[in-house]
Image (cartoon, grey):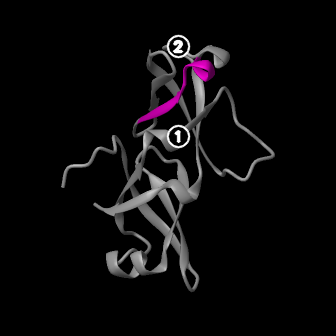
Amino acid sequence: MSLSIRNQIPGTVTSVSAGEAMAAVKVRLAGGQDITAAITADAVKELGFAEGSAVKVLVKSTEVSLATGPVTGVSIRNQIPGTVTDVVTGGAMGSVKVSVEGGELTAAITKDAVDALGLAAGSSVVALIKSTEISLAAA
């Protein structure tokens, strides 16, 4: 299946904590980072996710926020450090490619944010992704 979601990073499930409706699935990405995806308990069952399952982590570029360093005092736990490799801006929006251990992420953010953060190739950033905005596919 082809997808328009460009942020696809391989990983391995390290744990599944299922509730009645939702589950927290912890994944170790190919680069060694740990992230958490909040998906439905039905999806966990239907896709057979368990510790050791190979998965692809999928995130729309509009769901990736960027910071110039680690952020404290927020509920977003998925914080992946990386380096900006490319920035393209238009009148209102920008597309920022970030090299991370094990892959690449693209963030769609406003041009104002690109300018305010001073983002350019070589900038160090941290990609912030809410667990509810991460989808998982069986690898």
Foreground residue among 103 and 129:
129
Q: Nearer the viewer, residue 128 or 94?
A: 94
In the structure shown, which secondary structural element does the residue marked by tag 2 occupy? loop
131 with respect to 136 (left or right)? right
Q: Position of residue 102 (x, y in %)?
A: 40, 40
Question: Do callouts 2 and 1 mark residues in contact (Cβ within 8 Å)?
Answer: no
Image quarter hosting the N terminus: bottom left
Disc number for residue 90:
none
Rendered location of residue 18, percent (x, y): 55, 80
Residue type marked 2:
Ala
Of 43 and 77, nearer the camera is 43
Q: Which residue is mark 1?
A: 64
Label 2: which residue? 120
**Secondary element type, mark 1:** loop
- For the residue carrying disc 2, how many other residues have a C-alpha within 10 Å: few (<14), some (14-19), or many (20+)? some
Picture quadrant where residue 116 is located: top right
Q: Is residue 72 magenta?
A: no
- Which of discs 2 and 1 lies nearer the camera? The answer is 1
Q: Residues within 10 Å of mark 1 (few under 14, many from 20)?
A: many
Main secondary structure found in the magenta portion: strand
Magenta stretch contains residue 110 = yes
Magenta region: which residues? 105-114
Q: Residue at x 53, y 40 (%)?
A: 64
Mark 2 → mark 1, Cα distance in angstroms: 17 Å
